[in-house]
Amino acid sequence: MSGRVILVGAGPGDPDLITVAGLKALRAADVVVTDRLVPTELLEEIAEGAEVIHVGKIPRGEFTPQETINQILVDQALAGRTVVRFKGGDPFVFGRGFEEWQACERAGIPVSYVPGISSSIAGAGLAGVPVTHRGLVQGYAVVSGHVAPDDPRGSIDWDHLATSGLTIVIMMGVQNLPRITERLVAAGLATTTPAVVIENAGLPTMRVLSSPVGELAAAAEQAGVQPPAVTVIGEVAALAQPCS
């Protein structure tokens, strides 16, 4: 008898920010396939006897290939188990969650989705930064900084983004922050544009670093900012709380 897979978003880091539906799914799971960035306290909610499989990716370190993760989900569900794929933030925001959905569908396995609060918005909000604000900005763009602007693998039009008038939210951009900010400024973004980096959003170790975008990369390096971190660039970033 086939089981099922539930893709569950854990939210931005604080265990209290998981949804009620996400918590119910965790408690009903026979198997939880979990990422590195989920709140570990939430794993205590799993039923006694349920199995936990860790497949987290360490930046530039150990990782489980996506194809292997897909196969784990399929194999566990085909064994008749209720499988929760537990991911930080939201499974469909830079989480490869839909790739996992498609793998389950191809195998004929029922799959469902429980949204999580994405740190792309919540990280900014927890630092006192609204990504939109009446009178300042009417929209925002969330992009990945995983590859640099000059990397041929990239598909982001950084030049257009620089002059879009939108709040720019960059995920996974710590390593490439110098090249990203340099490109944005070269494309017309004023060096004095407010910017903020939020490290470990939603955790007790959260830090908020504010700087004009032209000085942001140097300030982040001097402060020793490490992933996971969310970068917000735009007038709303001036509303951020001071570094703590």
Image: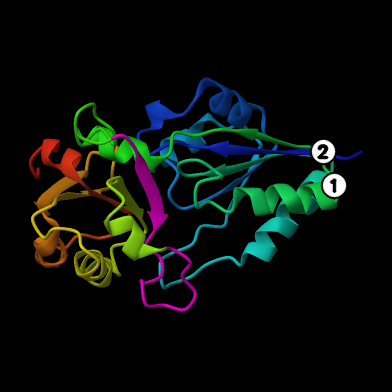
Residue type, label 1: Leu
Residue to which mark 2 is pinned:
3
Whether residue 47 is visible: no
Can you give x and y, in whole percent of width and height, for residue 17 in the image? 40, 28
Can you give x and y, in whole percent of width and height, for residue 34 in the image? 55, 48
Q: Secondary structure at mark 1?
A: helix
Q: Please say whether residue 142 is one of the residues in the magenta stretch.
A: yes
The rendered magenta stretch, by its main secondary structure, is classed as loop
The residue located at (66%, 36%) in the rendering is 49
Residue type, label 2: Gly
The mark found on residue 115 in the picture is none
Question: Along the horizontal axis of the image, is 113 left or right of 42?
Answer: right
Can you give x and y, in whole percent of width and height, for residue 20 in the image? 52, 20
Q: Residues within 10 Å of mark 2 (few under 14, many from 20)?
A: some
The residue located at (55%, 33%) in the rendering is 115
Residue to which mark 1 is pinned:
78
Q: Which residues are magenta?
A: 138-156
Q: Secondary structure at mark 2?
A: loop
Residue, far top: 20
Can you give x and y, in whole percent of width and height, for residue 38 in the image? 45, 44
Q: Residues within 10 Å of mark 1 (few under 14, many from 20)?
A: some
- Above or below, 122 against 188 in this view is above
Contact (Cβ within 8 Å) of mark 2 with mark 1: yes
